[in-house]
Image: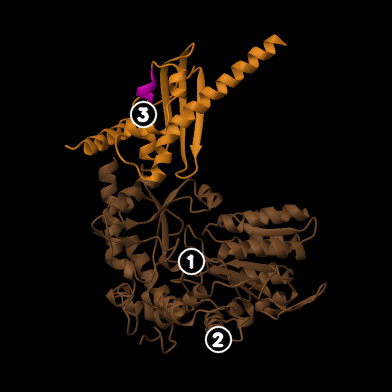
Chain colours: A orange, B brown
Amino acid sequence: MTNENSSKQRVLDHYRNPRNYGVIEDADLVSKEAGPPCGDEVHFYLKLDRNRITDIRFTSSSCAICKASASMLSEMIKGKEGDYVMNLGEKDIMDMFGMDLEPNRRKCALLPLAAIKKGITNQRTQQKRAVSSDRT
Amino acid sequence: MYVESDPSGADPCFKERLNSSFHFNWGMKALGTSDIRNDFPILQRKLGGKPLVYLDNASTSQKPKQVLDAMDEFYRNSNANVMRSTNSLGLEATEIYHGARNRVAEMIGASPKEVIFTRGTTEGLNVLARILTKKYVCSGGKVITSILEHHSNILPWRNSVSVVGAKLAVLPANRSWTMDLDRLEAELSDGADIVTTLHVSNVLGTINPVKEICRLAHDHGALVVLDSAQGVPHMPVDVKEIDVDFMVFSSHKMLGPTGVGVLYGKQSHLEDLEPWELGGGMVKSVTADEVSYEDLPTRLEAGTPNIAGVIGLAAAVNYLQDIGMQSIVDHERRLLRHAFEVLPKEILELYGPTEAYSHSGMLAFNVKGIHPHDVASALDKEGIIVRAGHHCAQPLVNALGTTATVRASFYLYNSHEEVDLLGQGLRRSVEILT
């Protein structure tokens, strides 16, 4: 089996049997992103210990590429620090897929990372505001 | 030489019954067979090793060699600017350009003065929204549209009414997914200036009762703008019979090139309108502080037009009319009926009415449990091109209870075999993705 082929099988497996699928009721961070091209929507639920992601779940109403991406990403970042996530980019997601994606499907693949980054950024902004309002 | 599908002018239903078992029109060129398909170079190509099955005609149609040759011939032999030259080449080009306008006007039952060339339906709707709202809609006035519309028939009006402080009433659809005439009449009775709606839904293929809409609107003193982007390419359309005030459509959805569209307006209306673009080719004389404009249609076409594109459109009109628009209606209905028979309904969610007679040749559906983009990708691997998404009609798609659908849309070159391939491709998508 070629690498491309095994990558395809792995992606298909993540789509059919998504890992970390579901909701965390008492999540420390909830984040959502929607993408116009496919009408994809993905929600992430994170438990945090300071900056470290101790647990992660997601739900999605999305195409196969987006769902597989969220599933693989959730495995990749569980146990990692927020900064690690913020430093991930398009190339990391493409490496995670290990196969060529058509340009319009790349957007679907990138949506889950955008969702988590948005959540972390929002939380950091709120924390900064909280700190500065404590000072005043 | 082709002949009209129905030279006797007999009852079209009778002919449809007679033809239902085989896909020939009365005579010469059989729709959906090599008779037609050989005219379309792109249909001979393969996609990933599979023959191309093109079922995205509501997005854009393919082009026959007659259209490509007409444009090529113009550029090779007759190219010059039109309307302003007195040299023989310029006069020749102008004559060809006028001839092309005559052909297009004839197709829709209009006078050539009533046919203004644009870049496409979107430009036509934007222009009409801007200038008609400014001229006819006062602060507190109202424009009526519907939830069925393509974004290009909602957004320009939303913008234009806000500029004058008027209201945009967006009517819901009735049960058969066409404009609700009772609601329309209620809105009109309440006072409205313009009704703008589509002829045929670009998602469901349902056909609006346009004559009724025009009659009701006119009874209440309102103007009607018709978006016929999915109408004119697929059925006989006569603007005088419909009695519509303005109508717009695009060349590229009816075998012609991209970048050309038509804005039809009743002559008396067009004469009332100030030119919306100013420049070359549309003035009689300009002095330091005065200008007098040309007569219709030239006064509404500033600048050098898309000459070759218009010639391509006229060639497309010739092609369609040689086959006969009623033959195209009949053919698409047979394909649709076949689709309702052979597509695997047990795995599908179909949207809109499922009677072929009420439809133009397209259908919207989802494969249960699979995102439409994944279905489209799986079909793509089989060489089958469909559209997936919200089809630039998000309010309608949301009203259907979903965020996106697959859409297969047919045209004169599509065959029953291609519908069968679509069915097989859909079954295969389920095997791969579930």
Q: On the rendered structure, is B140 left or right of B5?
A: right
Q: Where's residue B174, x and y in %?
A: 56, 57
Disc 1: host chain: B
- Mark toward the viewer: 3 or 2: 2
Which quarter of the rendered picture does the N terminus of chain A lie within? Answer: top left
Going from N to C along the chain, the mark reached first, 2 or 1, is: 2
User: Is disc 2 placed on a helix, strand or loop?
Assistant: helix
Amino acid beneath label 2: Glu
| A72 within the magenta span | yes
* Magenta region, residue range: A71-78
Q: Where's residue B396, x and y in %?
A: 53, 52
* Location of mark 3 (residue): A71
| B294 within the magenta span | no
Amino acid beneath label 3: Ser
* Location of mark 1 (residue): B258
Amino acid beneath label 1: Thr
Instruction: Check residue B95 in the rendering and tell me which mark sits there, or answer none.
Output: 2
Do tag 3 and tag 2 residues touch (Cβ < 8 Å)? no
Q: CA distance from mark 2 to mark 1?
A: 22 Å
Q: Residue at x 52, y 28 (%)?
A: A118
- Mark toward the viewer: 2 or 1: 2
Q: Both on one chain, marks 2 and 1?
A: yes
How busy is the neighbourhood of tag 1: few (under 14 within 10 Å), some, or many (20 plus)? some
How busy is the neighbourhood of tag 3: few (under 14 within 10 Å), some, or many (20 plus)? many
Question: Does residue B87 lie above or below B192 as drawn?
Answer: below
How busy is the neighbourhood of tag 2: few (under 14 within 10 Å), some, or many (20 plus)? some
